[in-house]
Image (cartoon, helix red, strand yellow):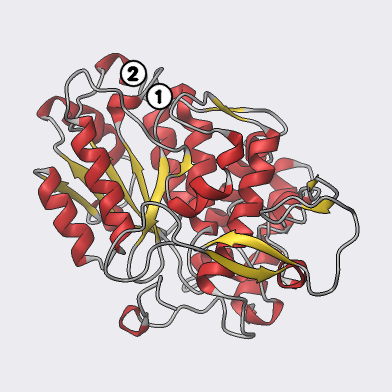
Amino acid sequence: LCSCDPPVRRGGAWAAGASAESDETDEDESVDVPEAGPPRGGPRRAPAGQKRLKAEALAEAPDLGPVGSGGWHAEEDLTDDMRLVAKQAKDLYVMQQKVALTEFNLRFLTSVTLRSYVNPVATQHLVNALTLRAQNEDALTLRQPVYLGCSARVIGWDATGASVFASEPCTMRRSMQYVMHQMHYVGWSALDLNKPGVDGFTVIMDYGGGFNPMHFLNPKPVIELAHLVESQWRRRLNKALLVDMPASFRVILNIFLRFVNPATRDKIRMVPSSGEAISELERMGCDAETIENARRYMHERRQPGRKHTWHPLVDFSFFRDYLADLHLSEDTEEITEEIHMRLREAVQAFRLSRWGPPTGRGTAAAPPADDYDFCGSE
């Protein structure tokens, strides 16, 4: 569990995907955790079985760091350059902000985070990220509820184990400034869901259901999103697919592009149809459930008069099963502290179920993409 948040106790046992009837457990007691994704060759619409994870495996798993820290951290993965940029950033932050970093942000300085700020060392970029995280700390720790104003969520993974983040402007309930905390929370959570050693994520913005221009009249949140990509998510946008983007949205996109560097612009692709978007996901090696999720929601968004549906935060069978008792749906309007705590439990259980426990040094060092296996294989 995230050491920055107290563990949740439900039904007399530390929450691990199943409640218990008593505070006492035997050494060999197991908890039921849904399988993390379908077998290779086809999506799993409902869990075909339960993967048994020993309770002690969850108890002995490494701490899940704060939101956005990249999951598990091994101190030995820190290089000299990482230690240097972390020290410089802490000192510079104090000098600029006149306060010390909170525990939340100190624990953000993992090897997963810091490798985005070396080669070359980019101290000011890291300070900018820490400053924005400090400004949004209440939302990222759920000391205040986070409004869910659109469908922004993780829908699956590519062949390397990097998250796929999806959102559709037609699902926006209010203007963009009201969904920025959600963007921060889901974007950082996407990094925590990656396979150990993998960084970054792909974004799919699908305009097939249209968009409301009134939601984008204020350019400030568009600029904030650009700064989010360039500072907090530095080097972490693998690609952005803009599906069926109408010409009328180009003015808004141009505002965003003015505030990102050329390398980021090169990662943004116009995709003319939902069919081509699905083909791109297939070329990325996304697993069957990820592709089926995308196919389903893209078809649904293009049906006039049909209700748009999605599971908030992470729209994937493991999380729908794990969090089923919370009754989350497209009608859920905010992330509460309870939902946050349960999601962090689910992230920990998912990482153990899908990726397995860390094997020691090197868990934060990504090998070349060609070396990855299908992320759902046993």
Q: How dense is the environment of label 1, judged by Cα within 10 Å: few (below 14), some, or many (20 and up)?
A: many
Amino acid marked by disc 1: Met
The reply to whether dot 1 and dot 2 touch (C-beta < 8 Å) is: yes
**Residue at the image point whose x is 79% and y is 74% from the top:** 28
- N-terminal of the two: label 1 or label 2? 1
Label disc, if present, on residue 176 of the rendered structure: 1
On the rendered structure, is 247 left or right of 203?
Answer: left
Q: Give the x, y percent position of residue 138.
A: 69, 34
Amino acid marked by disc 2: His
Q: How many numbered marks are there?
A: 2
Along the line of sight, which residue is nearer the eye, 200 or 321? 321
Q: Give the x, y percent position of residue 343.
A: 61, 47
On the rendered structure, is 123 left or right of 28?
Answer: left
Label disc, if present, on residue 333 of the rendered structure: none
Quadrant of residue 143 within the rendered picture: top right
**Residue at the image point whose x is 14% and y is 37% from the top:** 244
Does 328 sit above or below residue 25?
above
On the rendered structure, is 218 left or right of 302?
Answer: right
Residue extending farthest to the right is 24
User: Can residue 372 be seen in the rendering of this structure?
Assistant: yes
**Residue at the image point whose x is 44% and y is 38% from the top:** 311
Q: Give the x, y percent position of residue 149.
A: 45, 25
Does 196 sit above or below residue 42?
below
- For the residues marked 1 and 2, what is the alpha-carbon distance in whole angstroms? 6 Å
Q: How dense is the environment of label 2, judged by Cα within 10 Å: few (below 14), some, or many (20 and up)?
A: some
Does 368 sit above or below residue 259?
below
User: Can residue 69 be seen in the rendering of this structure?
Assistant: no
**Residue at the image point whose x is 44% and y is 78% from the top:** 378
Does 139 sit above or below residue 274?
above
Can you identify the residue that label 2 sits on? 215
Q: Is disc 2 placed on a helix, strand or loop?
A: helix
